[in-house]
Image (tube, helix red, strand yellow):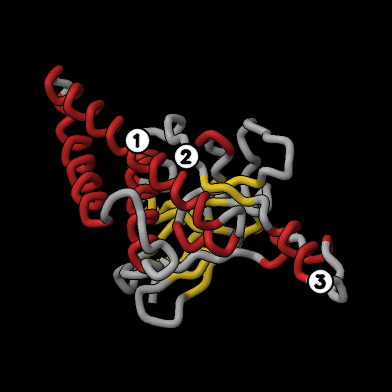
Protein backbone atom coordinates (compact mmCIF):
# COMPACT_ATOMS: atom_id res chain seq x y z
CA UNK A 1 0.00 0.00 0.00
CA UNK A 2 1.28 3.44 -0.76
CA UNK A 3 2.55 5.62 2.07
CA UNK A 4 2.47 9.40 2.24
CA UNK A 5 5.30 11.60 3.45
CA UNK A 6 4.10 15.14 4.03
CA UNK A 7 6.22 17.96 2.66
CA UNK A 8 6.08 19.93 5.89
CA UNK A 9 7.85 17.05 7.65
CA UNK A 10 11.00 17.80 5.63
CA UNK A 11 11.54 21.27 7.14
CA UNK A 12 12.05 22.99 3.77
CA UNK A 13 12.00 26.41 5.44
CA UNK A 14 15.20 25.54 7.35
CA UNK A 15 17.30 25.93 4.18
CA UNK A 16 17.24 28.99 1.93
CA UNK A 17 16.29 28.37 -1.71
CA UNK A 18 19.13 30.56 -3.01
CA UNK A 19 21.79 28.61 -1.09
CA UNK A 20 23.79 25.70 -2.44
CA UNK A 21 22.73 22.07 -1.92
CA UNK A 22 24.74 21.48 1.25
CA UNK A 23 22.44 23.28 3.73
CA UNK A 24 19.41 21.53 2.28
CA UNK A 25 21.02 18.10 2.60
CA UNK A 26 22.06 18.87 6.15
CA UNK A 27 18.49 19.87 7.00
CA UNK A 28 17.10 16.65 5.54
CA UNK A 29 19.61 14.05 6.74
CA UNK A 30 18.18 13.45 10.18
CA UNK A 31 15.82 10.52 9.65
CA UNK A 32 16.70 7.01 10.84
CA UNK A 33 14.86 3.71 10.57
CA UNK A 34 13.90 2.14 13.89
CA UNK A 35 15.96 -1.00 14.48
CA UNK A 36 14.60 -2.09 17.87
CA UNK A 37 11.22 -3.83 17.71
CA UNK A 38 10.98 -5.15 21.27
CA UNK A 39 8.24 -2.67 22.16
CA UNK A 40 5.77 -3.99 19.59
CA UNK A 41 3.16 -6.50 20.61
CA UNK A 42 2.97 -9.88 18.90
CA UNK A 43 0.11 -8.79 16.66
CA UNK A 44 1.65 -5.39 15.88
CA UNK A 45 4.97 -6.80 14.69
CA UNK A 46 3.49 -8.90 11.90
CA UNK A 47 1.96 -6.12 9.72
CA UNK A 48 5.01 -3.91 10.24
CA UNK A 49 7.33 -6.70 9.04
CA UNK A 50 5.08 -7.35 6.04
CA UNK A 51 5.02 -3.69 5.01
CA UNK A 52 8.83 -3.55 5.26
CA UNK A 53 9.16 -6.68 3.12
CA UNK A 54 6.75 -5.36 0.50
CA UNK A 55 8.33 -1.92 0.20
CA UNK A 56 11.94 -3.12 0.13
CA UNK A 57 10.93 -5.60 -2.56
CA UNK A 58 9.09 -2.91 -4.51
CA UNK A 59 12.07 -0.54 -4.27
CA UNK A 60 14.79 -3.10 -4.92
CA UNK A 61 16.59 -0.63 -7.18
CA UNK A 62 17.28 1.53 -4.12
CA UNK A 63 18.28 -1.40 -1.90
CA UNK A 64 20.49 -3.54 -4.10
CA UNK A 65 22.52 -5.41 -1.48
CA UNK A 66 20.42 -6.21 1.62
CA UNK A 67 21.94 -8.55 4.24
CA UNK A 68 19.52 -11.33 3.21
CA UNK A 69 16.93 -11.91 0.50
CA UNK A 70 13.36 -10.70 0.75
CA UNK A 71 12.28 -14.25 -0.11
CA UNK A 72 13.88 -15.47 3.12
CA UNK A 73 12.26 -12.61 5.05
CA UNK A 74 8.84 -13.56 3.67
CA UNK A 75 9.42 -17.17 4.70
CA UNK A 76 10.22 -15.97 8.22
CA UNK A 77 7.13 -13.72 8.34
CA UNK A 78 4.94 -16.63 7.22
CA UNK A 79 6.45 -18.84 9.93
CA UNK A 80 5.84 -16.06 12.47
CA UNK A 81 2.17 -15.85 11.39
CA UNK A 82 1.71 -19.59 11.79
CA UNK A 83 3.37 -19.79 15.18
CA UNK A 84 1.42 -16.76 16.40
CA UNK A 85 -1.78 -18.69 15.70
CA UNK A 86 -0.58 -21.93 17.33
CA UNK A 87 0.65 -20.00 20.38
CA UNK A 88 -3.01 -19.52 21.31
CA UNK A 89 -3.03 -23.17 22.43
CA UNK A 90 -0.90 -22.04 25.41
CA UNK A 91 1.06 -25.27 25.10
CA UNK A 92 4.61 -24.80 26.33
CA UNK A 93 6.14 -26.08 23.08
CA UNK A 94 4.03 -23.67 20.99
CA UNK A 95 4.97 -20.71 23.18
CA UNK A 96 8.67 -21.56 22.96
CA UNK A 97 8.45 -21.97 19.18
CA UNK A 98 6.77 -18.58 18.84
CA UNK A 99 9.30 -16.84 21.08
CA UNK A 100 12.13 -18.28 19.00
CA UNK A 101 10.69 -17.14 15.68
CA UNK A 102 9.88 -13.70 17.11
CA UNK A 103 13.47 -13.26 18.28
CA UNK A 104 14.71 -14.27 14.83
CA UNK A 105 12.33 -11.83 13.11
CA UNK A 106 13.37 -8.96 15.39
CA UNK A 107 17.03 -9.73 14.68
CA UNK A 108 16.42 -9.80 10.92
CA UNK A 109 14.52 -6.52 10.98
CA UNK A 110 17.28 -4.93 13.05
CA UNK A 111 19.91 -6.08 10.54
CA UNK A 112 17.85 -4.79 7.65
CA UNK A 113 17.20 -1.49 9.44
CA UNK A 114 20.93 -0.95 9.93
CA UNK A 115 21.45 -1.60 6.23
CA UNK A 116 18.66 0.84 5.31
CA UNK A 117 20.21 3.52 7.52
CA UNK A 118 23.56 3.00 5.82
CA UNK A 119 22.01 3.39 2.38
CA UNK A 120 19.76 6.31 3.29
CA UNK A 121 22.34 8.31 5.25
CA UNK A 122 19.45 10.08 6.94
CA UNK A 123 17.51 10.88 3.76
CA UNK A 124 13.79 10.67 4.64
CA UNK A 125 12.78 9.80 1.08
CA UNK A 126 14.95 6.69 1.05
CA UNK A 127 13.92 5.61 4.55
CA UNK A 128 10.29 6.00 3.50
CA UNK A 129 10.89 3.68 0.53
CA UNK A 130 11.93 0.94 2.95
CA UNK A 131 8.66 0.93 4.90
CA UNK A 132 10.51 1.14 8.24
CA UNK A 133 9.07 3.20 11.09
CA UNK A 134 11.45 6.11 11.61
CA UNK A 135 12.48 8.90 13.92
CA UNK A 136 14.27 12.25 13.68
CA UNK A 137 17.78 12.23 15.18
CA UNK A 138 17.85 16.05 15.26
CA UNK A 139 15.22 16.10 17.97
CA UNK A 140 15.47 15.12 21.60
CA UNK A 141 14.23 11.54 21.73
CA UNK A 142 10.84 11.46 23.38
CA UNK A 143 9.78 7.95 24.32
CA UNK A 144 6.42 8.98 25.75
CA UNK A 145 3.39 7.64 23.84
CA UNK A 146 2.31 9.99 21.03
CA UNK A 147 -1.03 11.68 21.32
CA UNK A 148 -3.98 10.45 19.31
CA UNK A 149 -4.17 11.66 15.70
CA UNK A 150 -6.95 14.19 15.19
CA UNK A 151 -9.32 15.24 12.41
CA UNK A 152 -9.69 11.72 10.96
CA UNK A 153 -11.56 11.94 7.66
CA UNK A 154 -12.43 9.06 5.34
CA UNK A 155 -13.63 8.99 1.74
CA UNK A 156 -14.09 6.48 -1.03
CA UNK A 157 -11.06 5.52 -3.10
CA UNK A 158 -10.76 5.79 -6.86
CA UNK A 159 -11.64 2.11 -7.37
CA UNK A 160 -14.46 0.02 -5.92
CA UNK A 161 -13.66 -1.31 -2.46
CA UNK A 162 -11.09 1.41 -1.74
CA UNK A 163 -10.93 3.85 1.18
CA UNK A 164 -8.69 6.89 1.69
CA UNK A 165 -7.99 8.27 5.16
CA UNK A 166 -6.58 11.64 6.12
CA UNK A 167 -5.68 12.64 9.66
CA UNK A 168 -3.36 14.89 11.64
CA UNK A 169 -0.69 12.93 13.57
CA UNK A 170 0.60 14.24 16.88
CA UNK A 171 4.18 14.16 15.52
CA UNK A 172 5.90 14.97 12.24
CA UNK A 173 7.35 13.00 10.55
CA UNK A 174 5.33 10.05 11.75
CA UNK A 175 4.56 6.39 11.17
CA UNK A 176 0.95 5.46 11.83
CA UNK A 177 -0.96 2.21 12.25
CA UNK A 178 -4.43 2.00 10.68
CA UNK A 179 -7.04 -0.50 11.84
CA UNK A 180 -10.47 -1.39 10.43
CA UNK A 181 -13.52 -2.93 12.05
CA UNK A 182 -16.43 -4.38 10.08
CA UNK A 183 -18.51 -5.08 13.20
CA UNK A 184 -18.94 -3.49 16.60
CA UNK A 185 -16.36 -0.71 17.19
CA UNK A 186 -16.61 -1.38 20.94
CA UNK A 187 -15.37 -4.96 20.43
CA UNK A 188 -11.58 -4.77 20.74
CA UNK A 189 -11.11 -8.20 19.15
CA UNK A 190 -12.86 -7.10 15.94
CA UNK A 191 -10.27 -4.46 15.05
CA UNK A 192 -7.76 -5.58 12.38
CA UNK A 193 -4.50 -3.87 11.45
CA UNK A 194 -4.48 -2.88 7.78
CA UNK A 195 -0.99 -1.42 7.53
CA UNK A 196 1.61 1.12 8.63
CA UNK A 197 1.68 4.47 6.83
CA UNK A 198 4.01 7.48 6.79
CA UNK A 199 2.48 10.90 7.35
CA UNK A 200 -1.16 11.92 7.46
CA UNK A 201 -2.62 9.83 4.65
CA UNK A 202 -3.45 6.15 4.20
CA UNK A 203 -5.06 4.27 1.35
CA UNK A 204 -6.79 0.91 1.85
CA UNK A 205 -8.42 -1.43 -0.66
CA UNK A 206 -10.13 -4.79 -1.20
CA UNK A 207 -13.13 -4.08 1.02
CA UNK A 208 -16.46 -5.62 0.01
CA UNK A 209 -18.81 -2.98 -1.48
CA UNK A 210 -21.75 -2.28 0.78
CA UNK A 211 -19.79 -3.05 3.97
CA UNK A 212 -19.94 -0.53 6.81
CA UNK A 213 -16.36 -0.05 7.98
CA UNK A 214 -15.10 1.66 11.13
CA UNK A 215 -11.54 3.03 11.00
CA UNK A 216 -9.04 4.36 13.51
CA UNK A 217 -5.37 5.35 13.55
CA UNK A 218 -2.54 5.71 16.06
CA UNK A 219 1.06 6.89 15.86
CA UNK A 220 4.20 4.84 16.50
CA UNK A 221 6.55 6.45 19.02
CA UNK A 222 10.24 5.81 19.57
CA UNK A 223 11.34 2.34 20.66
CA UNK A 224 8.03 0.93 19.51
CA UNK A 225 5.90 2.83 22.01
CA UNK A 226 2.40 3.06 20.56
CA UNK A 227 0.27 6.17 20.91
CA UNK A 228 -3.41 6.57 21.67
CA UNK A 229 -6.07 5.67 19.13
CA UNK A 230 -7.92 8.40 17.29
CA UNK A 231 -11.67 8.71 17.53
CA UNK A 232 -13.10 6.18 15.04
CA UNK A 233 -14.74 7.19 11.78
CA UNK A 234 -17.07 5.16 9.61
CA UNK A 235 -17.85 4.81 5.92
CA UNK A 236 -19.96 2.48 3.78
CA UNK A 237 -17.81 1.03 1.01
CA UNK A 238 -18.90 1.46 -2.60
In front: label 1 or label 3:
3
In the rendered structure, find residue 107 and report the number of the disc placed on it: 1
First along the sequence among labels 2 and 3: 3
Mark 2: which secondary structure? loop
Q: Which residue is at 67% across, 50% downward?
A: 30
Disc number lying in front (2 or 3): 3
- Pointers 1 and 3 in contact (C-beta within 8 Å): no
Furthest-bottom residue in this view: 158
Q: Earlier in the sequence, mark 1 or mark 3?
A: 3
For the N terminus, the quadrant is bottom left
Position above or below: 7 against 152: below
The residue at 51%/51% (across/down) is 118
Pinpoint residue 157: horizontal percent, then vertical percent.
Answer: 45, 77
Asked if one can make out residue 36 in the rendered structure from this viewpoint, the answer is yes
Task: Please tell me whether mark 1 sits on a helix, a strand or a loop.
Answer: helix
Residue 182, visible in the rendered structure: no
Of residues 219 and 50, the one nearer the viewer is 50
Identify the residue shown where x is 39% and y is 33%.
41
Q: Earlier in the sequence, mark 1 or mark 2?
A: 2
Kindly identify which residue carries mark 2: 35
User: Residue 100's image quarter?
Assistant: top left
Query: Which image quarter: residue 85?
Result: top left
Amino acid sequence: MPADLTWDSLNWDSAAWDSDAAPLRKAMNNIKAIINFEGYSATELDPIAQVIHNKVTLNAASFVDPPFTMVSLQTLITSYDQKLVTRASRAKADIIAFNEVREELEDKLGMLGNYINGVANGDPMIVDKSGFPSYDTARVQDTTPPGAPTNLRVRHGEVSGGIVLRYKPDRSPSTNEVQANMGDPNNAAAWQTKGMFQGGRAELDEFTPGTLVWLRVRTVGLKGVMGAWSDPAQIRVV
